[in-house]
Image (spheres, rainbow, N blue to C red):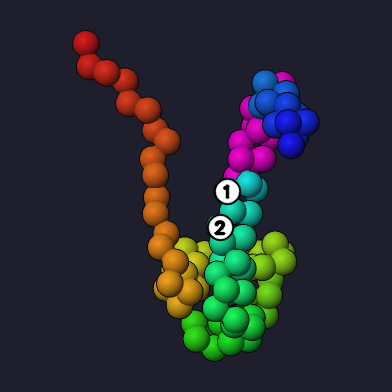
Amino acid sequence: MSDWKKYKEYVRETNPEIGKDLDEVEEISAIVGAMIEQRHNLKLSQRDLAELCGIPHSSVARIESGKTTPNLSTLLKIFNQLGLKFSVQSSIKMAKPM
């Protein structure tokens, strides 16, 4: 794991744009991973979840396989049915007034 961390640090230093892409992929992976884990905990199939959400089974399958990134509306439908909460945290750092 430390090798991966070192590699990410190296990428961020040498190419910040690709470093941002790595961060985004990891964030999406964490969201989808939580979704899959909770679906398994609830003993739901992808088809069951899709029916509960009113979305096509293929959409759930593509999201879980990483072939597509869900839009916010779809993500909220899925999280609601799974009993998961979605929160947003700002990473913007404001300058202190003089």
Q: Main secondary structure of the magenta part?
A: helix
81 left or right, relative to 98: right
> Foreground: 78 or 92?
78
Query: What residue sits 58% from the left and 87% below the top?
Result: 48
Judged from the image, the secondary structure of the residue bearing numbered disc 2 is helix
Magenta span: 14-24
Mark 2: few, some, or many residues within 10 Å (few <14, many ≥20)?
Answer: few
From the image, tell me which residue sits under label 1. Answer: 27
The type of residue carrying mark 1 is Glu
**Picture layout, residue 90 above or below residue 77:** above
From the image, tell me which residue sits under label 2. Answer: 31
**Picture layout, residue 88 above or below residue 55:** above
Tell me the quadrant of the picture where the C terminus can be found. top left
> Foreground: 94 or 26?
26
Is residue 18 in the magenta section? yes
Query: What residue sits 70% from the left and 62% below the top?
Result: 66
